[in-house]
Amino acid sequence: MATMTEAFIPDFVKPFLGRIAFDYGAAKGRSCLDWARRSHPDVSWDGLVLVMLYAEALHLGSYGRPITGAVYRFEGDVAISSDLVSSIIVRPNPFVDENGLPDDMSVSDAEAIEEACRDLREKGLEGLQRRAQAWRHGDVADYALMVDPTRAGAEELLSDFAYFGLHLVF
């Protein structure tokens, strides 16, 4: 399935579609999920997965890197992540820093998750699902589509991700 926005994808982004992958940080994924669930107990599992996808994109836009590097797939119009599901079996991180965050989470990670939760409350699950469709390439949310093409250095960032992505540590 093509993305809804395929006609609007800048030419310099197209060579990177399907080429950017990260080595998922399962321990950090578990920490982020645990922290998000404690901070927002009213958010459903589907909502948490969508919040994490949205937070990955927000963090990528602000800091030039995702939070966990998880793979997000779509079943129909719904974003799912087997990476996040698999991280549930990882032992929780018992260490907390001075900000009350698990020590493998940064303040910027928490801020992106908080912003994604605010957007979930404002736009609803369907609103965030529609936004996630813009990052869809086939049945996967593609990190190449999450990079704002108007961002200074966007092409270089995509090139770095394509080359170094699997070597980043989360």
Image: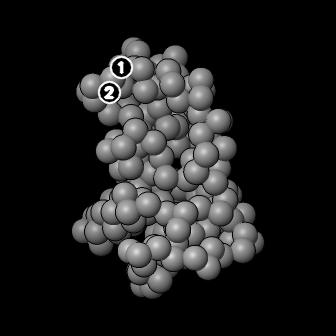
Looking at the rendered structure, the secondary structure element under dot 2 is loop
Q: Residue at x 44, y 60 (%)?
A: 106
- In front here: 148 or 169? 169
**CA neighbours of label 2 inside 10 A, class few (<14), some (14 to 19), many (20+):** some
The kind of residue on which mark 1 rests is Pro
Q: Is residue 40 above or below residue 70?
A: below
Residue that mark 1 sits on: 10
What amino acid type should be assigned to the residue bearing mark 2? Pro
Q: Residue at x 28, y 29 (%)?
A: 151
Instruction: Determine if residue 64 is in view.
Output: yes
Looking at the image, the residue that sits furthest to the right is: 89
Distance in Å between CA atoms under marks 2 and 1: 7 Å
Q: Position of residue 129 (x, y in %)?
A: 41, 56
Which numbered dot is residue 149?
2
128 to 102, vertically: above or below: above
Residues tagged 2 and 1 counted as in contact (Cβ below 8 A): yes
Q: Image quarter for residue 113?
A: bottom left
x, y percentage for residue 4?
40, 36
User: Which of marks 1 and 2 precedes in the sequence?
Assistant: 1
